[in-house]
Image (cartoon, grey):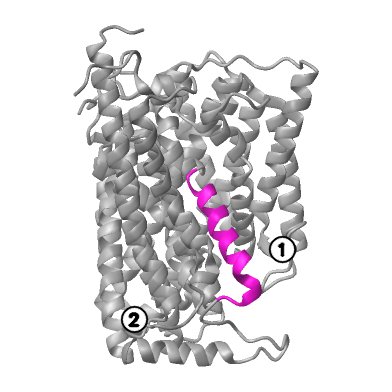
Amino acid sequence: MTEPPMEPPERAAERGRPGAGVVVPLAVAGVCLAVPFVAMLWVGSYNRLTPAFIGIPFFYWYQMAWVFVSTALTSTAYVIVRRLERTRKAAAAAGGEQR
Amino acid sequence: MKDGVNGVALAVFIFFFLVVTAMGFVAAKWRRAENADNLDEWGLGGRSFGTWITWFLLGGDLYTAYTFVAVPAAVYAGGAAGFFAVPYTILCYPLVFTFLPRLWSVAHKHGYVTSSDFVRGRFGSKGLSLALALTGLLATMPYIALQLVGIQAVLDVLGVGGGSNWFMKDLPLLIAFGVLAAYTYSAGLRAPALIAFVKDALVYIVIIVAVIYIPIKLGGFDHIFSKAADAFAVKNPETGKPRGSLITGPDAQWAYATLALGSAMALFLYPHSVTAVLSSKNRNVIRRNTTILPLYSLMLGLLAMLGFMAIAAGVKVKNGQLAIPQLFADMFPDWFAGVAFAAIGIGALVPAAIMSIAAANLFTRNIYKDFIRPDATPEREAKVSKLASLLVKVGALIFVLTMDKTVAINFQLLGGIWILQTVPALVGGLFTRWFHRWALLAGWAVGMVYGTWKAYDTPSATQDHFGNTNLIPFIGEKGYIGLTAFVLNVVVAVVLTFAFKAFRVPDGVDETSPSDYTADAGDAGVRADLPTAGH
C-alpha cells in the first residue's frame, strides 16, 4: 500500500475534494446501486408474456431473475465500499491521532 | 369454506404457537445485559445483533403475515398489478445500502433510539421531531391491526372463531394477543428476534413446498397461467372491464413503477424497520444484510405465484384475503396445512411485537421525554415504553374488533403515503444540513394533506375511496399518490428553505458533526458500553 494521503479520503470527500483513488471505485459502486432502478422502473422493457420459462410468463420470471442480478450488484458495491473504508481506517491509523 | 374445525391442522397450529410462546418468555434471558432497565436493552435488544440475527429480525419484521396474505390476494384479484411488490422489494435494498448505515452511525454516536431522535438532534427542532413521531405512530397502528387481520384469516379457515357468540368468536384472537403482549413486555425486542427464527424457517419450508407441490398437483405452470388468463379475461358485468391481466396494461405502467419506487422509499422509514436496523451491532451488519435480505424478495415473488394457483385450483372466496389460507386448506394434507397456518400466524406475531416496541419507543422518546417529563431517567423511559407497547396493542385490538377490516386496510394504505412524507427530513438530514427545519415541517404538512385528500378522493377497485393511484399533475399519467405528494413535499421544502434563508429566519442548532455519519463500532467516541459489542 502507498503512503497514506494527507488526509483520509472520506474526510476529503466531505470537503468536495475526493482523493484520486476513491472517485472511480465510488462511481462504480454508485452505478451498481443505480442500475436496478433503471431496469425495474422501465416497465415497458419487460411487460410481455413471452418467452415463458417453465410455463411462467416473461413478466414474472424476469422480475424474479432481477432479484439475483440486483443482489450481485449490491454485493459488488458492498465489497468496494468495505475496501475503501478499510483503506481509510488504515490510513487514519498510520497517520496517528488526527483529531 | 370447510365446515367445522379441522382438528389435525388446529393441533399442529397450537403446537407451534406454544413453542414460540415458550421462546418468547425465554428470550428475556437471552444475551441479557447486566443493567437491562433502559431503552437500549428493552427497545433495541442491547444494540448487539449480528448479521444473521438482524437478517431474521428484519425478514420477520418486513415480510409480515399481512404481506403473505395480501400480495397473493392482490394477484388473485387482478393479476400483474399485484406483482409490483417484487420490484418494490428489489429497489429498497440499494436505498437501504445508501442511507441507513449513516443513520446507524449517527444514532450510535448520540444514543438515538428512534429516527425522530435523530431529526431533533440534526435540526434542533422538537416540533419537526414530534411531527415525524406522530406520523410514525399513525402509520404503525393500523399496520399492527392488519397483523391481527392476518391471524383472523387463518383462524377463520381453521374453523375456529366462527361462532355466533362474539366472545367465543374473538377468544382465540384475544388469547394470542394476550400472550404476545406478555412476552413483549418482559423480553422487549429480544422476543421477536428469537421467534423470528421459527417464523422464517416455517415460512421458507411452506413456500418451497407450496411452489413445488401445488403446481405438480395442478398440472404445471403452463396450465396454471392459462387458467388464470381465462379467469382474468372474464368481464365484470357491472363495469364492463375484465377482472385483470397477466401483464400490466399500457396505461398502468406508470402506476406499477411509481408504486414500486414509492413503496421502496417508505419501507425502511417505518419505525419498526428503523428499530431493527438500530439494534444491529455495527455498520457493516446493515450493508451485509442488503445483500442477503433479497432472498425474502424472491420468496415474495414465489408467494405471489400462489395467487395464480388459487385461481387455477378453483378457490372461490368472497374475501380475497382468504384465498391463500383456503388454497392451503384445499391442497395440503391436514397436518401440513397446520404448519402453513402456523407460519402465517407466527408471521403476524413477530412484526406485531416489533411494531409495538417501535411505536412505544417513539412515544417515550419523542412525546413523553421531549414534552412531558424531560428529566425522565433511563429506567423510567424503559418502564413508560413497556406500558406504551401494551397500550398500542390494545388499541390495535380494539381497532380490529370494533371496526370493519377495510378501515385497517385503508389506514395502512394511508400509512404508506404518510411515511413517505418523512423522507425529506430524514434522508435529506442524513446527507445535508441545507434544509431549514420549518421548511421541512411545511413540506411535510403539505405532503400529508395532499396525500390524504387525494387518496380519499380516489376510488379503489372495491370502494369509492382510498385508491392509491391517481393522475400525476403535469405528467398526465396515473401514478402512486404517495410519490406525487412526496415530490410536492420536496418542492415546498426547497422553496421555503431559500425563502427562510433569504430572510434569515433562525435555524436550529445541529448537534451532530460530519464524521458522526461514518463512525463505526470501535471508533473513538462511539458508544462502547454494548454487552456483546466487538467484531
Q: Which residues are magenta?
A: B248-268
Asked whether B250 or B438 is in front, the reply is B250
Q: Residue at x 44, y 54 (%)?
A: A35
Residue B267 painted magenta:
yes
Would you say B346 lies left or right of B118 here?
left
Kindly tell me whether residue B426 is visible in this rendering: yes
The residue tagged with tag 2: helix, strand or loop?
A: loop
Q: Are marks 1 and 2 in contact (CB under 8 Å)?
A: no
The residue carrying mark 2 is A53
Q: Position of residue B26 (x, y in %)?
A: 24, 41
Q: Position of residue B40 (x, y in %)?
A: 38, 27
- The residue type indicated by label 2 comes to Phe
Q: Position of residue B430 (x, y in %)?
A: 51, 30
Would you say B350 lies left or right of B463 here?
left
* Quadrant in which the N terminus of chain B appears: bottom left
Mark 1 falls within which chain?
B
In this rendering, is residue B458 above or below B335? above
The residue tagged with tag 1: helix, strand or loop?
A: strand
